[in-house]
Image: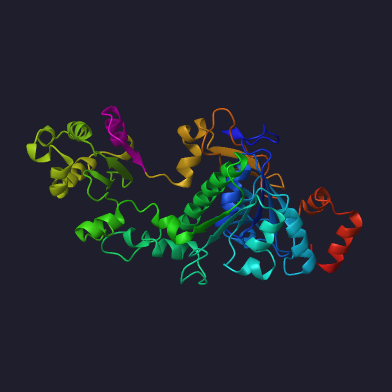
């Protein structure tokens, strides 16, 4: 397991300044991705801090999630509702390449920090705006969270068992999908500026669109065939066999025999050469029509095998398979460790903490974890000094409550 370094080589985004005005998940995660690859990310927090500091499991009154989500970021507190706070934000944003925010549409405009105001100060600014429904359209003013984006985007309806209500995936996947779209959009816009093809622009990211964008052939299937994709549990609809099965020791295994040659190897591995050579099952289309029979054969074999032995047999047969990992499985897995995807860090009081490593892997300019999330306002005075404020002005801002 890799130890997070105290220092690291500059990443591919070194020299790029990102200002984050975001809370909780979508904008902060997008900014974190850029920070991990070398961007100078400055997170603006209200004086009472990002609510994520108090979400889920806490250590010394700070969320463990916070330490991961805010790693590599510099932190400044500003009360944007005060004139001095908004003025400081304008000066800071005027030095930035990218601004990323996830407030409700119109909120920044009320503070004098809308697109027209900021573009006048910084024509090359890229303003990434993440919201539930986007900056336009009849729903733009509705409040939106990732859960609503997952519902409206089509994901919730297709998630879960067929005989149960729609289910949650298990993480805030709608927010995270929006984060990846935001980071991708920001870098495309940045490339345009840096190659001299144009000036800054708005990157408009809607939570529901970010979910909908990964929904495969959901709409074409409905439009052409009138087919509405339903919940299918552990199955992969239209592909056979690809399902989740119970083993003899009451564990779960995912088996994906969804290729003609793979299917033959799978049937041979479970002692069913009759099914491997059955012309009724020669193609995926034919196998789908016989899915219950195939699943029953696999389930019967697994009743005689525990998870470890089943994995061993299937891996020798070169059949894609895997157990369903818990957090405990992940932190001890040799492949995770070999790829530095579980990293050792240290909390402020010296408590060790394992956390996710960096993805994707770049061969020449890899990302790095330089530090974990810091205390509220940890870098406020240093940042204000960088952008030209004197110590006397900083003292005045403190007295007025702007910082």
Q: Is residue 90 left or right of residue 13?
A: right
Residue 138, compared with residue 227, is above or below; it is: below
* Magenta extent: 309-323
Question: Can residue 395 be seen by looking at this rendering?
Answer: yes
Identity of the residue furthest to the left in this view: 279
Identity of the residue furthest to the right in this view: 392
* Figure coloring: rainbow
Residue 162, compared with residue 30, is above or below; it is: below
Residue 49, compared with residue 187, is above or below; it is: below
Residue 221 spot, x, y in % from top left: 25, 55
**Would residue 312 be counted in the magenta stretch?**
yes
Q: How many marks?
A: 0
Residue 135, compared with residue 64, is above or below; it is: below
Question: Can residue 353 be seen by looking at this rendering?
Answer: no
Q: Camera-side residue: 242 or 19? A: 19
The N terminus appears in which quarter of the rendering?
top right
Q: Camera-side residue: 257 or 207? A: 207
State the image quarter where residue 61 is shown. Answer: bottom right
State the image quarter where residue 37 is shown. Answer: top right
Q: What residue do we see at 50% from left, 69% from top?
A: 140
The C terminus appears in which quarter of the rendering?
bottom right
Q: What residue do we see at 46% from left, 72% from top?
A: 138
Q: Is residue 282 left or right of residue 160?
A: left
Q: Is residue 263 left or right of residue 84?
A: left
Q: Camera-side residue: 153 or 169? A: 153
Residue 243 spot, x, y in % from top left: 27, 47
Residue 228 spot, x, y in % from top left: 25, 61
Residue 259 spot, x, y in % from top left: 23, 36
**Would residue 70 be counted in the magenta stretch?**
no
């Amino acid at each position: 397991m890799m130890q997070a370094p105290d220092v690291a080589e500059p990443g591919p985004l070194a020299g790029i300044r990102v200002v984050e005005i975001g809370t909780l998940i979508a904008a902060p995660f997008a900014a974190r991705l850029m920070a991990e690859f070398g961007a100078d990310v400055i997170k603006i927090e209200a004086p009472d801090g990002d609510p994520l500091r108090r979400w889920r499991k806490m250590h010394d009154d700070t969320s463990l999630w916070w330490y991961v989500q805010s790693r590599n970021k510099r932190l400044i507190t500003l009360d944007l509702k005060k004139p001095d706070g908004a003025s400081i934000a304008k000066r800071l944003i005027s030095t930035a390449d990218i601004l990323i925010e996830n407030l409700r549409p119109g909120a920044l405009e009320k503070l004098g920090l809308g697109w027209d105001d900021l573009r006048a100060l910084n024509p090359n600014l890229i303003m990434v705006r993440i919201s539930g429904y986007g900056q336009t359209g009849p729903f733009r003013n509705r409040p939106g969270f990732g859960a609503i984006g997952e519902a409206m985007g089509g994901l919730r309806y297709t998630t879960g068992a067929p005989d149960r209500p729609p289910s949650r995936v298990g993480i805030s996947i709608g927010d995270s999908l929006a984060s990846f779209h935001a980071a991708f959009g920001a870098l495309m816009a940045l490339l345009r500026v840096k190659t001299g093809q144009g000036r800054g622009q708005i990157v408009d990211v809607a939570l529901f669109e970010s979910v909908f964008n990964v929904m495969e052939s959901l709409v074409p299937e409905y439009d052409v065939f009138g087919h509405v994709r339903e919940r299918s549990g552990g199955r992969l609809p239209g592909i056979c066999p690809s399902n989740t099965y119970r083993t003899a020791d009451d564990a779960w295994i995912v088996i994906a025999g969804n290729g003609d040659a793979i299917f033959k190897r799978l049937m041979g591995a479970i002692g069913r050469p009759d099914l491997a050579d059955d012309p009724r099952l020669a193609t995926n289309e034919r196998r789908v029509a016989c899915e219950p029979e195939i699943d029953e054969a696999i389930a019967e074999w697994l009743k005689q095998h525990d998870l470890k032995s089943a994995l061993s047999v299937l891996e020798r047969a070169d059949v894609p398979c895997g157990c369903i990992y818990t957090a405990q499985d992940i932190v001890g897995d040799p492949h995770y460790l070999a790829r530095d995807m579980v990293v050792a860090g240290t909390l402020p009081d010296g408590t060790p903490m394992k956390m996710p490593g960096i993805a994707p892997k770049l061969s020449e300019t890899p990302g790095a974890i330089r530090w974990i999330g810091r205390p509220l306002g940890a870098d406020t005075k240093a940042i204000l000094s960088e952008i030209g404020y004197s110590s006397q002005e900083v003292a005045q801002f403190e007295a007025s409550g702007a910082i």
